[in-house]
Each structure stands twice: as structure tokens, then as C-alpha cells.
Image: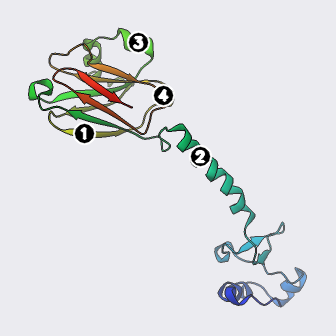
Amino acid sequence: MVSPAPEHGARGAGAARSGSPAALAASGGEQRMESTERGPETAMNEQGTARAGERSPRRHRLVPLVLALAAAAIAGGGCASGRATLRIEAAAQTNDGRPLYMVLRAVDGAEFVTETYEDIAARVFAAPPDPSIIRADVVYPGMVRAIAFDPPERKPIGVYFLFTEPGDRWKTMLQQPLPSTVEIRLGPNTIIGTSP
């Protein structure tokens, strides 16, 4: 009978319970283990027989994959989890101190350029809801608001602010891939800055 190594005595004892001496002899002295009893120091050969003291080859195959995914997330600078956050900083005098709607919408470039304030207002309050609207939220003057959302995979995102009396820059477009956080600063009736 194969005796377990001293540092793996508990696992070896569990493995000894799972087979008979006849099964041990038939397998050439190697012991079959249940998957729940297998630890990081155990590997399986082609027949499913455990060999104590060796690492699982599956774990070695995952290491390059995990490293590649981490490198892609860092290099791309995009939101690796698929979620993005829009951080909106509204001045105290934004929209004359009154709340306003902010709308996120999946849109192509040509449509974004031509759509009007009235077009967006109609889409936000449409029944049934417009499927291109990702999210609509209320922004309060004098506050900072962080809004998390799931962006579409490829389409740019239009960000619209429905000011009571909109200025020239009441909307902006975010190109894909999005960074994990986008900051937008609002003035009295217009967008005064975006980053990055």
C-alpha cells in the first residue's frame, strides 16, 4: 500500500478509505481519489488516478489566460467588467438651481449630430420606452452624482442634459471603448467639461 507523505497525511488517509487492497493492486499501487478530496498538491493522470505531490495541469493552463486578461484590461484602459461609471458634477446654479434629466442613449454618429432637444425629450417619455435609452436619471444642482451603467458593446453613447433653457452644448458623445469612469461638469445651462 502507498503511504501518504507526512505533510499530506489527512488527504492520504481520506484516499485510503476510498479503495480496497484488491483495487489498489489492480491499479498498480496508485489510489483513486474523489474530486472533493483532491488538493492543490495532487494531480490526476490520464486514467483519473491521483498522484500525490504533483500540481494539477489544469491550474497551469489557467495562469497564462488570467495573465493575458489582466494585461488586456490594463493596456486597453477600458472597463474590464463591462460596467462604466458616469460622474456628473453639477454647479449650484445649474438649470437655475432646479433638477434636470440626464439621458444615456446608444446612438450612431450621424443620428447624434442631427437629433434635436425635442427628439430626445420625446424618446425619454415614450410609451413603450425607446430601446436605445440606456438610462435616464435626475441630476441635482450643487451635487456630484455617480451613475453606473452597462454600455452597449460597439455603439457610441449619447449623453444628454435636458436643461430648462439649454445652451449650445447640452449633449455630448462618448466613443467606445469607454474608460471605466467618465467625468462631466455642468455649468448654468451647458456642459462645461468632460474627462477623460
Q: CA distance from mark 4 to mark 1?
A: 22 Å
Q: Quadrant of residue 13?
A: bottom right
- Name the residue that disc number 4 marks: 176
Circles 2 and 4 in contact, beta carbons < 8 Å: no
The residue drawn where x is 72% and y is 74% is 42
Residue of label 1 = 145
In-image side of 35 versus 168 (left or right)? right
On the image, numbered disc 3 is attached to which residue? 111
Crowding around mark 2 (Cα neighbors within 10 Å: few <14, some 14 to 19, many 20+) is: few
Is residue 122 something that shows in the picture?
Answer: yes
**Rendered view: 190 above or below 36:** above
Q: CA distance from mark 3 to mark 1?
A: 27 Å
Front residue of this view, candidates 156 and 184? 184
Among the 4 quarters of the image, the one containing residue 128 = top left
Q: Mark 3 or mark 1: which comes first in sequence?
A: 3
Left or right of residue 80, residue 52 in this image: right
Residue ID at (59%, 46%) = 71
Q: Quarter holding the C terminus?
A: top left
Kindly identify which residue carries mark 2.
71
Residue 40 placement: quadrant: bottom right
